[in-house]
Amino acid sequence: MILSDRDIKKFLKEGKIKIIGMKDPDVQIQPSSVDLRLGNEFRIFKTIRKGFIDPISDNPEEYTELVYVEDGEPFILHPGEFILGVTKERIELSDDVVARVEGRSSLGRLAILIHATAGYIDPGFRGRITLELSNVGKMPVALYPGMRICQISFELLSSKAEMPYGHKLRDSKYQNQESVTTSRIHLDKEFRN
């Protein structure tokens, strides 16, 4: 069951959900979600002289560049472009709450997608959310740090997760991320020597 605004506020008060850095709860808390704001860091993909990206052996630093945009300045997302961004807010979930991140319809109507596949946030997750931003339209769109970029909704699990994200026996490679974070698929157990 998706939590209502009333239950989101209750869970925030109880600490079952933490949204650190929320600027204006009256604006950001919606009927069944919370709007999160765009951070200042972006990771753009460079064109390099290479036939393909090997997610197991390549270093993402080779084919991406970190860009910092000051508050009040725009980041221009061009048609067909895919970049990584990050939320200003840090999220912390208890072991019995799961979350989903979706785009805001106001940006979707400008052809901006907020995530390709990473819309699911496991119970126990702590950190800022890396966003997979793309422009599927025909015109460039200005994105501003601090603007409400996405919405996060919450659901209560039937019971606490036995091994939540961040558990010492779990492969939680994105736990406590504070910046825009590239793929860490090379750390998956099946790819380690």
Image: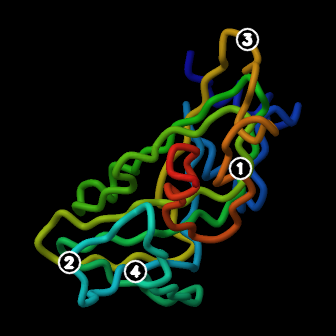
At numbered mark 4, what does the secondary structure look like: helix, strand or loop? strand
N-term mark: 3 or 1: 1
Q: Give the residue type that dot 1 points to.
A: Ile
Is label 2 in contact with label 4 (beta carbons under 8 Å)? no
**Crowdedness near tag 2: few (<14), some (14–19) or many (≥20) residues, C-alpha within 10 Å:** few
**Crowdedness near tag 4: few (<14), some (14–19) or many (≥20) residues, C-alpha within 10 Å:** some
* Residue 94 falls left or right of residue 110: right
Q: Give the residue type that dot 2 points to.
A: Gly
Q: Residue at x 46, y 86 (%)?
A: 65
Is label 4 in contact with label 3 (beta carbons under 8 Å)? no
Residue 121, image quadrant = top right
Tag 2 residue: 51
Q: How many marks?
A: 4
Q: Residue at x 58, y 45 (%)?
A: 189
**Crowdedness near tag 1: few (<14), some (14–19) or many (≥20) residues, C-alpha within 10 Å:** many
Q: Residue at x 73, y 11 (%)?
A: 159
The disc placed on residue 44 is: 4
**What is the C-alpha distance between the residues marked 3 and 1?**
20 Å
Quadrant, the N terminus: top right
